[in-house]
Amino acid sequence: MESFKEIDYKELTSVQKESYAFCQIQAVMSKRGWLEYHRLNDDHNGADWVSFHIDGKTERFQQKSRFTLSPKYYGKGLKVMVYSFADDSVYMYDHDDNFDTWEEKRMGVKVYKDDFLRSKTIPSFAIVNIIK
């Protein structure tokens, strides 16, 4: 069946890549007990979706295409999920914990004019769960 052949990620539009990454993230999360989620259309308090674990825990998540820290997300209790096409991995980190660490060390990392820290790689100081 033509519609079930594997696609080439590089040929997707940016919106399609974001949807693809979301599906990859959800596949990994479901293996770890996060079986329910609710996508938020308006980026509510920085969250792209809320997930519910089988043990009753609820977490708020922000999806990014690369490691990102920002004051606008600080204090909102967000976990950040990054899908890396390069190594087909999902990375998760606590935004506030990493923001505090970065603020303390500054690590010589460039801050963009909108006060975001963005990196193509995951900085070594980030406490990251690497999930394949």
Image: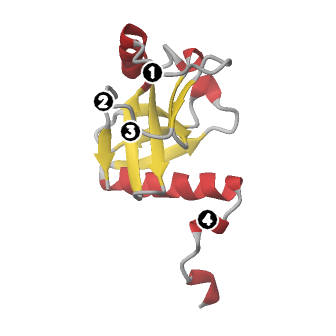
Identify residue type, mark 2. Answer: Ile
Residue labelled with disc 3: 92
Q: Earlier in the sequence, mark 1 or mark 4?
A: 4
> Label 2 crowding class (10 Å Cα cut-off): few <14, some 14-19, many 20+?
some
CA gap, disc 3 and disc 2: 9 Å
Name of the residue lying farthest toward the bottom: 1
Identify residue type, mark 1. Answer: Gly
Residue labelled with disc 2: 127
How far across and down, in percent of the image, does residue 123 sit? 38, 31
How far across and down, in percent of the image, does residue 72 sit? 60, 17
Residue labelled with disc 4: 10
Question: Which quadrant is home to the C terminus?
Answer: bottom left
- Which of these two is toward me, 110 or 36? 110
CA gap, disc 1 and disc 4: 33 Å
- Secondary structure under tag 4 reads helix
Identify residue type, mark 3. Answer: Met
